[in-house]
Structures are given as structure tokens and as C-alpha cells.
Amino acid sequence: MKHELIMMVIGIILISGCTGLEGIMNMFGISGVATKQETILQPQQGLGVTSFTIAVTDMLADTYNYVLMSVRNHAGGANAKNIMVSLENVKPFQLHECDYDRDASSIRTELCNQFYNDFGVPYKAHKINEMFPDEEVQFFWNIKAPDEGEIAKMKYNHIIYYTLSYDYAMVTTKTIAGISQDEFLRQSEEGPVTITGQQVSSAGEIKFTSTTQEPFIYLEGSGKTDINLNFEIENQGEGMATPETELIIIIKKPADTTINYNNEKITQFGWKNVSEMQSEHGNLSEIYTELASNTGDQLIRSISSDNLNSGKQTVSVPIKFDSSTFHEPQKILTFTVYITYNYLKEGQTTLSVYPIK
Amino acid sequence: MANKDKEIESLKEAIKFWEVNVEAAKLKGPEEFKEAKRKLLGLQGRLNKAIKKGEEGWMRKGWLARRKLKKKGGEEWGAYKEGKEKYTEEKRAMRPERGRALFGFGGEGPRKASDVLLSPGFIMFFYMAAFFLIIIPNPILIAGLFFLAIALFLSFRSGNQTYTVMAGAVIGAIITRGYLSGFIPLYGFDRLIGLFMAVGSASFMQLITKYDEDTPYEKLMVGGFGVVIVITTLIFITMIETFYLIIWLISILLFWTALVMNYPEKHPLGTKVSKMIPLICLVGAGIFYGLAYAFTIGGVMFGGVIDTIMHSLGGTSSSGGSIFDMILNPKLALAAQLKPPTEREYAPGATAPPNIAFTTSFQAIPLTGCYEHSIYTIIGKIKNTGTAFIDDIRLTIKTEEGISNPSVCQSGEVKDSLKKPDGVEGCIWHQGIQIAPGSTVSKSCLAGPVNVPTGLEELVNWFGDMICLPNCDFAYQGGEDVLPSHRCFFDVTASTAFHSRSRLPIEIIDNSYAKNKYLQGTLVSSIRPSTSSVGPVEFSLGGIEQPVWDNNDAVTMIVSTVNTGNGEVNEYSSIYLLIPKNLLDEEDGKPTCNNDDWVCFNYEGPVYEYSSGGGTWKDNAEALKQFAEGEGVGSIENFKLTYDSSLDNEVLKSDYAICFYNKGISGGSLMQTATCNLKMRPNPEGTLRRTEIIRGDVLYTYKVTSDASFEVRDCTI
């Protein structure tokens, strides 16, 4: 009995020691084994900022420091274009580049050992033309702290923001399920009819969701049925659609003679032909080369970024389903939706300047 | 030697006797057995001591002596080896019984489980475990309580009162464990120092107390505690939280003492070690405490220098611990020691005391004297109640204005040899006084009859200052119209010049961007509070609306100065603002203020051209020069020297407007406010946010006055 008791006490001691190990290690300044996990981009991110840091957060007046920013494109996303990273609220700091202190908003007129496509952009910004999925790029700036006088000889805490803007595209494939009236009635006798299509989207900040009532019902061999495809579009990212820009939505119907756009209503619903939009927004085929060959299957429209930033937007596509020569109990229609947008993300970090020379 | 032999023999006999008694006591009961055991162990201890002091005193020889003996060899070395072996064997022979007494193991005779569970060593083990688990970090506190519960249970079962003291010690440790961590800024060191102190103090007590089996434990303990408490009190009396430190110390001490006193004949760590431990531990702990003292109290005394560094070290950063920043940037640490930058600022609304603050007081010895022959020692005192070092303060004592002081109390004439500077009033005056935070400076002088008695000079020198003596012939020499008594009233005034600075960053956000953030519900106000340097006058800038840039957008700025100190503003020298051009109207380059109290000058482009023969003034710079001359400053160079040496870079080269408060400023006006309309110039293309910093400075002399008096009587009545 006594041996068991002694063993029990020894066990308790050992367990207590283990549970308190971290505290003991902390007491003597020994940190535990740390595992560093790589930052993973979420599906609702196209481009993500994996880190935004300042090399030394406590600076002396009139000294230099580094700001570092890493950007990664989602592996499941599209090619990002016109990527621009920029520091905001830089003043009263300056940027040091090519051996001179520069005003952050001044336009860069010379390049010094850098691979960014920065000529002609402000010193506060860096730009690259394209990032492929899963590509990661690190940007950096050399900043100079204000002098003592400018911060009134008191310790100064400053917030530096970054912005990341880029053009991005998201592709959504949505299948819409249809069922003949006879088949619907037959299945209804067995219970509720729950036939719905599938939706697959690539990574990106803009969420495009079908709210179309499914399945749509048609009469076999009996003329045309009007169907409204309804979609909700919303910003699911942490940033915003860049102010004063427009999102372009292109919908491509299946190459199927039974399906046609309702030409009487498409204008009323805000849709245009691709050629019309091209004349307004420039050459769209740069991004959608695959669409340019068959523009007859596509409709296009735009949404203001201000509207999208204020909340969900609803778009509808009027179509006609011609079942006069169609004699099948079910029909699956596959639509492809392309959304291109310019997105803006913001983040911040704080640093302090001590009024010491 | 013969006496020692007798004593040894006698003790051996006694031990044999008590060994029999112990066996007999086992049959009588546990209490009797323990008492007999204690007696036996005491005798064995005494026997060991007697042997050491007697014929086998050679055992006490040091390592060097033994080495010499070994080298020498021969009979003496043989005797040594033989004696040592014999001694070792005797000690070994005693082990089982000692082990049994301590832990219930070993020895002869039947054993029960309770012999182990209720043995002193076993109970001590639980107390020790509880104690160490409790004093180290939080996660183990619960385990410590568990062990404490077991220890308490076994203590009650054993019926030994000594354990009550230990239980109290451990519970005391639980109660006080938080205090040391609040006192010592370095995490973990409080516990480490606590252990040092515990071991050192207990060992020290062990040395100074002698075991006597006829003396009750309690007396020994109380005696030992008394000595230790006195010593520790002397050591820590000047430190803050002395009370808690002593509680902590006593708690540990009680525990340790109880442990060692139960078996006093053998210190667990050996005789030599027990002598060294107090020295090492107490001195070591003293050094640690001294460092801690320097980091806290010392930091305040010397302008918060070390505290500033600690503050910097404690900051957080996104790139890791900022201690690494300091290591990477040693210049920062070095400079921080020389010039603490952070303590001169505070967040508005904070309750921290101003760093520049002082009080005055007066003392006269005697408070009542006689007309004819009394000599008064007048002492004016200034106490620095702030946290910064004041390096130039002036003290004056003069008869109080507005009080009908009789003629006997009026100051005398200033003698030619001791002319006071212009503008200094009063009979006692000192300039350039330096005071460390928390300390008091006294300046004394003598006042008395005009005819200074012979030998007074020496007395004056003893007081260390005679500068005021010729100026302060307060006492009347007597006369026919002398009143029975008079009371003389004085003002004791201390004053110093000071800057209060203020800084207001205005973070402007692009209108379209702000609108979209607002639509998203993510717009956060970018209004930032102003930061003021700490001083008796709070100079603040504020009142900015959400600064969103748009065409023709403007914000309102309110400037105020408020006296938050315990004295009054003696004189304002100047109040001025530096406003960046991006906050000014593009056409006239000036802010629009609500009244004419503010005079603004704009510097666009190079305004002052320096050359070997001097400078050339242009446009607004000329106006500023004239204004500066009108203010009595003389020239812009003097202005820079007087107000802000950075103006050269800031104003003349960086396109700022400088605005002076042009209203007559007097010391009596404790609050000045102004409202200025600032027009924001457009953001550069593509800029979403930018910050413009407005700075301001108010220069003033600040004084603190207290009343004082003494009485003069006609002692002939």
C-alpha cells in the first residue's frame, strides 16, 4: 500500500512538472519550441498581403529604416495584372531611393537596381505588370524619419498604411437545371423535387452566387419559356472595389440552340453586347481572348464600385428556353460568368520616432 | 584535553542510555518516542562537536594543512587517515537511525506506513514542493495548493506544532508572491531573488543561533527572527514596499527555519557551505535589489532615464520584441540614457503628474525672537515634486506685498558689494539652483540687528551662505515707540522658465476613398489627439473635424493654454504656431483665425539669403523680423536662439507659416484660446492619406509662492 502511495506521489510530481514546464522556461527566459506556419491565402482572397513589417519599429529622428511587404497571388486564382503597392500617410517620413531623400508623392524618374516596373510612378509606390497564381513578390522601401524639430521634440507614433491595388478576374461556372412539366408532376408525386445545378468559382474577392429558382419548368415540344437567371454579387474580401472604377461582368450562355437571350429585355436589365462595351471601356479582349471569338454567346454589363462597396448587388439575365423541338424530361444549362475588377486592399503598421539625434 | 575526553566518554554513555530509552519509548507512544529520539540526536550532535574540538581536532584542518601533512607522511599522516576512517565509519553507523528519524526508512525494528507518511522528512518534502510550486509562475500554483493540502493533512495527523509555522509560511508566500513581481521589473528575477534571500537569511540565522536541547524551539526561532528582521529592515528601509518585502522574507524564513531547526545539529548543506551561503546570498540579493532600485526609484530620480529604456524595451513591435531593436540600434539605448524623450509627453486626460513641478516652504529659527539681539535663521526651501531635473530655478524671499508689515520687517538696503541682478526683488535670492526630482534644496541666511555681533561671520559661514545677510536687516534696534510684538510676513517664491510644446498631427483622408470606406462600414475616424509636453501649463491644439479632403474643405483648430500646475504664470514670453503650407490658403498662405489676436507670416520660397556679409531679408521674412524686433526679441537670430533653434530648418526652408499670439499676454491670464480656420490644399494625385503636423510652443516663467512669517517681540517687557 505504501509503495503504491509513494508511486502515486512521484507521478503527481512528474505531471505537475510537465504542466508547469512552460512557466518555468519562461521564468528563465527560455522560449518553447515554436512552429512557424506559413500564411495561407483564403479562397476569398485573390492577391493577399502575407506580411507588412517594419525592420525596426523604434527609430531615432533623422535615421533610416525599411518597410517590407510581401504579396502573393492565390494558387487557385487568375493572373493578376497591373499590381500596384503603395505606402500611404508617409509624411512626415521621407523615402530614400537612389541615394537621395524623396518626397513620397514625387514621381520616380530614375530606377536603381530594382526589378519593379516603377518608372513614372510615385516613390511611395511599386508596380509590376503581372503576377501568376501562387507567385509571391516582396516589395521594400527605405524610409527616413523626420528630424527632431518636425515632431516638436516629443516621441512621435505614426501609422503607415499600405494599399495594394490590382486587376483581377474571377470565373464562375454555373449549371442551371430544368425539368419538363410532366416529369415534374411525376416526381412531385414521390416527394419534393430538389434538382439544382452546381456552381464552381475560382478564388477572388468578389462573390458571385446564383439565386435562380431551380429547377425551371418547361413544356416539352411547346414553344418558348421565359426564364430569369438571378445572381447576387458581393464583396467578400477585406478590402474594397477600387473607388471610381467599374466591375465588368460577362455572362456566356451555352452554345445550344434551345437557349437565347431575351433581346427585348437585356437592355432593360443593364446588359450590352460585348462590342458596345468595348467601345466604352477599351479593349476587353486583352483579358478575355477566349471570348472574343464568339461574342454572340455573351452579354456584358458593369457595376459601379461605389454600389458594390455599399452592399450586395443583384443582376438578372433574361433568357428564353425554346422547347418546341426539345423532348427530354430534364435539361442542364451551363453558364460561365467572368468578372473583372480592380481591387484595393489596405493595412497598417505603427512605428515610433524618438527625438534623439 | 582530559576534560574533553571525559565529556566525550560521558556523552557516549549518555547516548547508550538514550538508545535504550528510545526503544522503551516506542512502547509508550509516539510522543514519548519522538522526544526520546530528539534527545538522542541532540546528544549525538554534541558528541560530534566534542570529538571535533577534542583529540580529533585535526579534522578541522584545512585543505592546505592536510596537503602538507600528506607530503610529510609518516606517523602523523597515518594517524590522520586512521582517525578519518574511524570518524567516517561512526558517521555511517549513525545514518540508518538518522534516516529513520527523518524519513521513516532505515534503522532497526518494525515499521509502519505511518512511520514514513508522518516522518518529518516526508512532511517537509510536501511543504517544500508546495512552496516551490507556489512561488514559481501561475500554472503551477494549483499543483502547489494540492501539495499544501497534503502537507497540512499530514501535519495535523503528526500532531507536531512546528508544522503550523511552516503552513503559515507557505500561505504567506501565496499571499505575498504578487508584490515582488510588481516591484522588480525583470520577470522571474523576483522569485530568484526571493530564493536567494530565503536561503541566505535562513543560513545566517542558523549561524547566529545555537542549539541547546534545554531551550525550547520557540525561543530560538523568535530570537533568530528578531535578528534577521532587524537586519533586513535596515537593508530595505529606504526602499519602497519594504513592508511587503519583509513579509515575504519572513514567510520564507519561517519555513526554512522550521526545516533546519528541527535537526539543528546538522545543517543540511554542511558547516562551511552554511557559512558561505549567507554572504553569497545576502550580498547577491542586495545587488539584485540595488539594481531593481536603480531601475525604479533611480529611474525617477534621474529623470526617468532607466525607466525610459525599460519602457522602450517593453514596447511591442510587429517584427518581434523591441529589445532586439535596442540591441540592433545601440545608439538609441545610449542616447536614451542621456536624454529621455518620452517622459516629457503624455496623452491628454492622463493623470500623470507634470514633470516640472515644485513647491516652496519657509522656516525661521526661532519663530519668535527679540528686537535687540535675536538673530533669525531664515530658510527657504524648494522641493522638486516633478519627475524631471530642474537645472535653473530662482528663489526669492521678500516681505509680503499687501500686508501692513511694520517697519521692523522691511528689508534693508542693498550693499554695493552684493548687488542683485536687475529685476530681482527680495532680500534672499538665488539663481541657477539645480534640484533632482524628489529632493529639496534649502537656502538659508541670517537676519538680525544691523550691527552684526562680533564673530557672526563664522556663524554665517557655518550656514554656508551669507549673501543675503547685508540685505536683510529685519530687526529693529529698539526705540521708544516699540510695540510689544510684531509679526513679519514674507513671500517665498520660486520661479523658472519653461517651454510647453504641443503637436497636432492631422491625418487627412481622400474624399472618395473615405466615402467608399463609409459605405462599407469600415471608415475609422482619423482624428488624432494632440500631444503636449508635460509642464505646469498645458498647451494644447485640437478641435479638428474629421479631416476628409475635398475641394474647398477646411477644418477648425482651437488653441488653448491652461494652467494645470500649483502656481501661476509669471510672464508669457511668446505663443506661436508652425503650420504647414498644405493647411493654408493657397492665395495668401495664411490661416484664417477668428480674431486679430494672431499674426501670421508666411514663408513661401527662400526668404532669407545667407552670405558671408550677412543676410538679406525679403517679403514676409522682413515682416517677421520687424515683428520680432517689436516683441523685443531683436532679430530673427535672437528669436531662434530664444525660442526654437530648429526654426532655421523648419520655417525658413520648409514653407511653414508662423503665427504669433499677438495679444498682450500677462501672467494673470491663465487661459488663452483661439480658433483658426485651416484650409487644406488638395492631395497629390493618387494619395489616399497624408499627415500634416502643426506644432506650437509657449514660453513662460512659472512661479510658486508660499506665505511665511516670524514674530519679533520686545523682550524687555
Image (cartoon, rainbow, N blue to C red):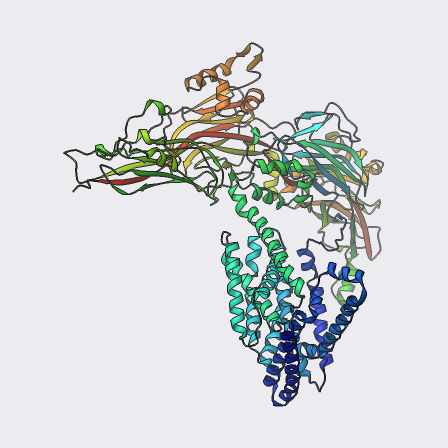
Q: Residue furthest left?
A: B480
Compare residues B146 and A162 and report the one nearer the observer: B146
Q: Is residue A177 left or right of residue B466?
A: right
x 57%, y 13%: residue = B609
Residue B391: where, in percent of width, then height? Answer: 47, 33
Residue B505: where, in percent of width, then height? Answer: 55, 34
In the rendered image, the quadrant that contains the N terminus of chain B is bottom right
Residue B22: where, in percent of width, then height? Answer: 64, 85
Q: Taking the image as drawn, is residue B159 in sight? A: yes
Q: Report which quarter residue A122 is drawn in.
A: top right
Residue A201: where, in percent of width, then height? Answer: 78, 48
Compare residues B154 and B159 and report the one nearer the observer: B159
Q: What is the number of callouts on the image?
A: 0
Q: Is residue B76 above or below residue B570?
A: below
In the rendered image, the quadrant that contains the C terminus of chain B is top left
Q: Is residue B116 above or below residue B469?
A: below
Q: Report which quarter residue B607 is drawn in.
A: top right
Compare residues B34 and B703 and report the one nearer the observer: B34
Q: Is residue B72 left or right of residue B15?
A: right
Q: Report which quarter residue A313 is drawn in.
A: top right
Compare residues B392 and B220 and report the one nearer the observer: B220
Q: Is residue B245 left or right of residue B467?
A: right
x 71%, y 87%: residue = B110
Q: Residue furthest top?
A: B613
Q: Taking the image as drawn, is residue B136 in sight? A: no
